[in-house]
Amino acid sequence: HSCQRGVGGLLGHCAQTTSSMDSSGERRRTRRTAARPARRGQDGAVGGGEKGRSRRRSVSTARGPGAPESGMGPTPEQRGTSLGFLGPCGHSVQPGEVVTLVKTCLDKESLDLQCPLCGAQWEWREIRDLKGLPESELSALEVRVEQLVQCRPDLYKMCPSCAHILKRASESTGTPRLYTQCPRCAPHLFCWECHSPWGAPDSTCPNASCAVVATLLSCPTVTDPLSQVRGCPLFRACPKCHALILHHSGCKYVCCKSCFYNFCFICLESSKKCREAKELYFSLKCKKPRAARQTF
């Protein structure tokens, strides 16, 4: 009987607890929370302690400095620093890709440099100014670029003011344009052949010596290692009458067959002026700075 009363009392108590829990959701949640066994953290403390909770929070939310939000890719700045560097168009490229691109174009005798991702036109000067490319590679490529410009005067020219490489444009009929314009420094038009200022687009070159200057600007240089004028243009114009003179062999002094003017093929000064300094006159090679290609 006492057992029955105990069981009945226990059932009554459970019913009260259930009724109380059903009538008050807040109390129900409180009692259930209190009834759960306490968890032990890694340090053995009940509930893990503040130290355990902070450790779990740090693992789940920690990100590296500058890391993007979850689900987002790297920013353009991060791509430029972690994957390579930013090209002229803003895309991230590797140094090896740029070097291979330039070599491939030079092998085809072309300077049509384009971004491998978007196809945007790149200029050699922009590539030359990029940071991160090996200087040894750049120096070798620059020599090849200058050689290509020198060997293809019909297609490429260097701006006489800023040395920017220009590609020759064509008319609507497909014929090469006789004039050009530097997009960097020259707001005016100038002749493609002799670099003289050009008037209206439908006019002609005003320079009477255009053909002579065109030869002086486009002729190859002397490459014979035994020549006394190695490095000079193959043709020079007489400083007095502008007749073209080709250096065959011998010393640095030449004589114009048209006006019999004597001058140094290297510095273009008269032989009389060079004779003022005997150590320069009697030397096989001129020690003065080599004169630039002539224009009139």
Image (cartoon, rainbow, N blue to C red):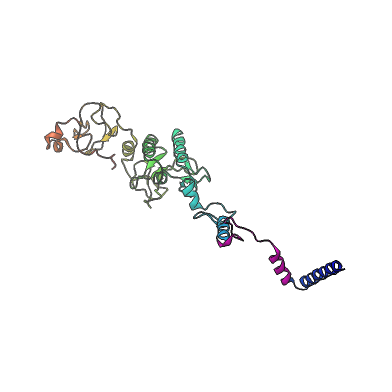
7 in relation to 231, above or below: below
Residue ID at (86%, 67%): 4
Please tell me whether residue 242 belongs to the stretch shown in magenta: no
Please tell me whether residue 28 belongs to the stretch shown in magenta: yes
* Quarter of the rendering occupied by the C terminus: top left
Residue 90 x, y percent position in the rendering: 48, 50
Residue 180 x, y percent position in the rendering: 40, 46
How many discs mark residues in the rendered view? 0
Which residue is at the front of the view, 188 or 199? 188
Residue ID at (29%, 32%): 234
- In the displayed image of the protein, which residue is found farthest to the right? 1
Magenta extent: 26-50
Residue 133 x, y percent position in the rendering: 41, 42
Which residue is at the front of the view, 76 or 280? 76
Which residue is at the front of the view, 53 or 192? 53
* Quarter of the rendering occupied by the N terminus: bottom right
In the visual, does 10 lie left or right of 219? right
In the visual, does 196 lie left or right of 112? left
242 in relation to 4, above or below: above
Residue 78 x, y percent position in the rendering: 49, 51
Indicate the quadrant where residue 213 lies.
Answer: top left
Residue 89 visible here = no
Residue 127 visible here = yes
Which residue is at the front of the view, 273 or 77? 77
Residue ID at (25%, 39%): 291
